[in-house]
Amino acid sequence: MEIVNFKESSAPKYKQIVAAIEDAIVKGKLKKGDQLPSLNVVKEKYNLSRDTVINAFNELKNRGIIHSVVGKGYFVSSEDIVLEKKIFLLFDELNSFKEDLYNSFLQNLGKNTQVDLFFHHFNIDVFNRLIHDNIGNYSSYIIMPANLKNVKVTVENLPKDKVYILDQAHKELEDYPVIYQNFEKDIFNGLLSGLEKLIKYEKLVLLFAKEKQPKGILKGFQLFCHTHNLNFEVINTLENRLPKKGEVYFVLDDKNLIRIIKKIKTAQLILTKDIGIISFNDSLLKEVVANGITTISTDFNLMGERLAEMILNNQQLKIENPSKLILRKSI
C-alpha cells in the first residue's frame, strides 16, 4: 500500500510516516491485524534512512498502535490512535491489596493510556515468556519480580529506560528505578509498635512460605524476637497445627488468615483473650472480619499514585513506600 506522500512540511519525515499511518487507520484503509510494509520496503520506496523508518514504527509501537512479530514484520494492533502510552504491568498474583494498587495506578494515569495486566504466579518460566513475548510492544514495563531468581538476564532484553521495578528491590536489578517495600525494617518497626500488646503472649508464631514471601519479612520478625527476648516459632503450614492459648500468629496471606480463624473457633479459644492474630497487608475485609484484624501494611494506594507519577514524568527514582501497624482487636 501507499504509506505516505511526502509534501513540503516542517514536520520530520518520521512524524509524517506516523501521521500517514494514523490517517489510514482512521479512514479504514488499515484495520486491526493488517500487515504494514517492511522497514526495508518503506526505506527504499521513499529513499529514507533506516533510522527514520524505525523511529516512526517505534513511536507507533510504544503507543500500542502497531506491534512486531519476529520474522514476520509489523501489524496493526489497535485502531485507537489517541493512545499516548501503552503499559505492560506484570504482577506476581492478584489479591485484594494488589487490586487497590492497580486501581490507584489507573486512576492517577489520566486519559489516553492503556495498561495490560499479566501474572507470573511465581513461575520463572511464565515470567520469562511473558517478557520475551512483549519486547518492544510497550512504552513502559512495570515488573514485580517477587522472589524469583536470575531475572536480570530476561529483564535486560527490555529498553532500560522503560523498565520500572515494583514491590521488592532486587540486588540484581538495582540499576532500575523502583518503588519498594523495606520488608525487614517494616516488620521490625510494625511489631515494635505493638510490643506492649505482644509481650502478654507466650509465643509469636510466623507462618512463612519461603517460595512466595520476601526474605526480609523473616529477617525482620527474627530480629524483633531476638532483640526483645521473645519466644517464637516459624512454620510453613497450618496443616496439623493446633493453635494454643498464649500464642499470637503472624499470618501473611488471606487464605491462611481464614484457616487460623477457623482453627481458633474449633479450639474454642477467644481471640485477644486467649490467642492473637496479626495479618500482613491491609484490606477492607480485615477491618471487619473477627471484629477487626491487626495488620502491618504498606500504603498500596500511595504506591499506585507514585508509580503513575514516575511513568508520566519519566522519572528514574528509587522510592521506599511507607508501612505501619494498624492496631485492631485481634491482639
Image (cartoon, helix red, strand yellow):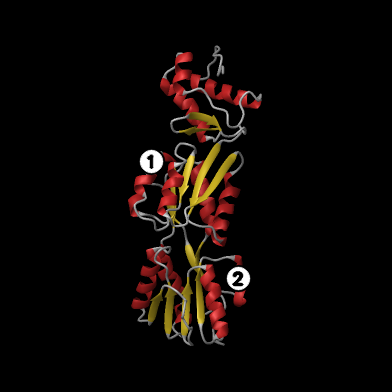
**Percent from the top left, x then y, of residue 71?**
43, 30
Looking at the picture, how far across and down is residue 114, in whole percent? 57, 42
| Above or below for 229 versus 47 | below
Q: Can residue 205 be seen in this view?
A: yes
Residue 303 % position (x, y): 51, 55
Name the N-terminal-most of marks 2 and 1. 1
Residue 331 vs residue 21, the one in the foreground: 21
| Residue 238 image point, x, y percent | 47, 76
Q: What element carries label 1?
A: loop
* Residue farthest toward the top in the current orientation of the protein: 8
Q: On the rendered structure, is 22 left or right of 160?
A: right
Q: Alpha-carbon neighbours of circle 1 within 10 Å: few (<14), some, or many (≥20)? A: few
Measuring 59% from the left and 34% from the top, which residue is drawn there? 78
Q: Which residue is drawn at 45% across and 15% down?
A: 44
Mark 2 closeness class: few <14, some 14–19, many ≥20 residues within 10 Å: some
The residue at 46%/41% (across/down) is 133
Compared to 284, does 126 lie above or below? above
Residue at horizontal 53%, vertical 25%?
36
Which of 4/330 is in front?
Answer: 4
Quarter of the image where one finds residue 8: top right
**Residue type of the residue flagged with mark 1:** Asn
Residue identified by numbered label 1: 157
Work out which residue is located at the far front of the displayed protein and give it.
72
Label 2 or label 1, whichever lies nearer to me, is: 1
Which quadrant would residue 206 be assigned to in this image? Answer: bottom left
| Residue type (three-letter) at the residue carrying disc 2 | Glu
Vertical arrangement, residue 279 with respect to residue 23, above or below: below
Which residue, given by chain and number where applicable, does mark 2 sit on?
287
In the image, which disc is placed on residue 290?
none
